Structures are given as C-alpha cells and as structure tokens.
Image: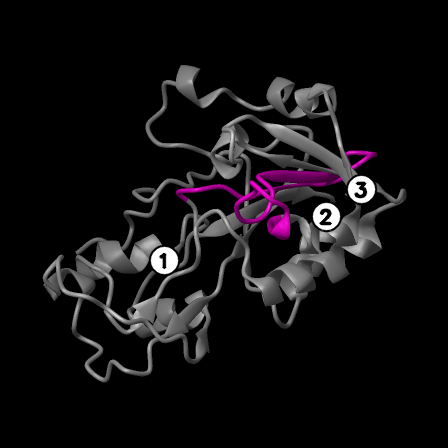
Amino acid sequence: MEKLNSLEEYQWIRDETVYFLSDERPGSRVENFLPNRFDHYCKVMHPLFRDPQITDEHLLWSEFPPDQPIEIQLGERLRLMELAEKYGLEFSKELSSASIRLKLNGYPRYLITGEEGDIEPETLQALVRLLQQFIREDSCYFLYGLLKTEDYIDTLFRGELAEVLELPKRAGLRGTPTYWWPADKAWCLYTDYDLDFSLVGGSRELIDALLAHDFLECIECDAATRIDNQADDTNRE
C-alpha cells in the first residue's frame, strides 16, 4: 500500500459530481457524491442487528432517558426488506433504516441500525470478493475524507483491492475509505458519515451482481435518488 502525496487521481470525482453546496434542490442525492459517468447505481445496506436483550418490540429508543447507560448486544442479523414488510413500508429507491423511524416516529429499541461511515467486516469481505471480478488492473485507489483521518486532511492511497481490508487498522484512519475505485474507473464506491449504507456506481453487470448477491442486501437507485435521512417520506402516516 502506497500513500500518495497528491490528490490528483481523485480529481475526476470532484469534476463529475454535482457539488451539493451549490445544488438548490432539497436534500442530497446520489449524483452529489458519485461521478455522473455511470449509468447504473445501487445502495449497499450496512447490516442491521437485533438486540436479544429487548423483548418488547414496541419500545422506542426515544423512551429511554438520555442519561441512562445502555448496553448493546448484537444478535441476529436483519435485512431491511424484511423489516420493511413487517412495518408495512412501501418500497422505494429511497428506502433505508430512516424509513422505519419516519413510519414509527422513532427507532425500535431492539433494532441496532447499520454503522455510519464504516462497512461491517463481513459485508466488506463479501464486497471485495465480488469486486475482484470487476477489475482489469491490480491497482486501486482509496481516499480517506478529512473526518476519517487524525489530522483532518484528505488522504489518498494506492494498492491492491484486497488491501482495503487492512486499511482501517492504519494509524490515524477511521472506518473504511470514503471513496475507492480501480485504476480504470470502471466503478466507484462511496461510504461516509450520515449514511448507514454505501453507494456504488458501475456497469449493468456489476449492479446486477450486487443485487443478486445472497449475502449483501442492495437496492438499485439512480443518480437523482435522494439519500438524506428525510428522503423517503412515502411511508409517513
């Protein structure tokens, strides 16, 4: 793994995204973060878990006093689509765990939502195995955004795809990279804070492989799909 002194290889992402601060539309969208060169996109959901200590599924997180210590246990791995069916949520490209909060006016206490800004290890390993099939060169790039570094400076690395599994262990780095992509720019993956899912742009074949994966949970979207936590208001009562 090589740490680069320049962010030049990252410039294409800046050039090909819609800058969200100048975007006058409400909320944020896929195209504010992923390059517009791709014809196909999807969300890779960060897994949710059941806390086995909680038997009352009607109990909400908001019902706990803010100063009360809470111990969390990660039990059964849950899928968003199954929870959507359970709570009568309509399917949309904007569907996320926030849709549950909007429908129930809060998150159930038994539900541990996906990590923000970090891909859970098993999900990350599954992603790497799948993406290996869609690289033509060994070299990939990994950008850590300023909030994920110790000195709050965007930092770019170059290395083999599988090395992304070890990057979080590097001193001064938090979570998985904000952006990663192969040298030929055939696809791009985005993970950052405020989202409990990752975004992928790429070919039809790549997105189909992600959607068909028996472990990963993915939802197809498009460049204009809203991704902020207020995006899916179709399930409000």
Labels 2 and 3: the sequence-earlier one: 3
Taking the image as drawn, is residue 205 in sight?
Answer: no
Q: Amino acid at mark 3?
A: Gly
Q: Which mark is residue 97?
A: 1
For label 3, the crowd category at 10 Å Cα-Cα, with few meaning under 14, some 14 to 19 and many 20 or more, is some
CA distance for labels 1 and 2: 26 Å
* Left or right, residue 83 beside residue 169: left
Q: Position of residue 84 (x, y in %)?
A: 36, 66
Residues at marks 3 and 1, CA–CA distance in whole angstroms:
33 Å
First of labels 1, 2 by sequence position: 1
Residue occupying the point 25% across, 80% down: 54
Asked if residue 102 shows in the view, the reply is: yes
> How many angstroms separate mark 2 from mark 3 (CA)?
25 Å
Q: Amino acid at mark 2?
A: Arg
- Label 3, secondary structure: give it: strand
The spot of residue 80 in percent (x, y) is 43, 66
Which residue is identified by label 3? 159
| Residue stretch rendered in magenta on the structure | 168-194
User: Under tag 2, what secondary structure?
Assistant: helix
Residue at the spot 17% in from the left edge and 75% down from the top edge: 58
- The residue carrying mark 2 is 204
User: Which quadrant holds the N terminus?
Assistant: top right
Q: Amino acid at mark 1?
A: Ser
The residue lying toward the viewer, choosing from 31 and 58, is 58
Question: As drawn, is 224 to the left or to the right of 177?
Answer: left
Q: Secondary structure at mark 1?
A: helix
Query: Looking at the picture, does residue 138 appear above or below residue 50?
Result: above
Number of the label disc, if any, that sits on residue 57: none
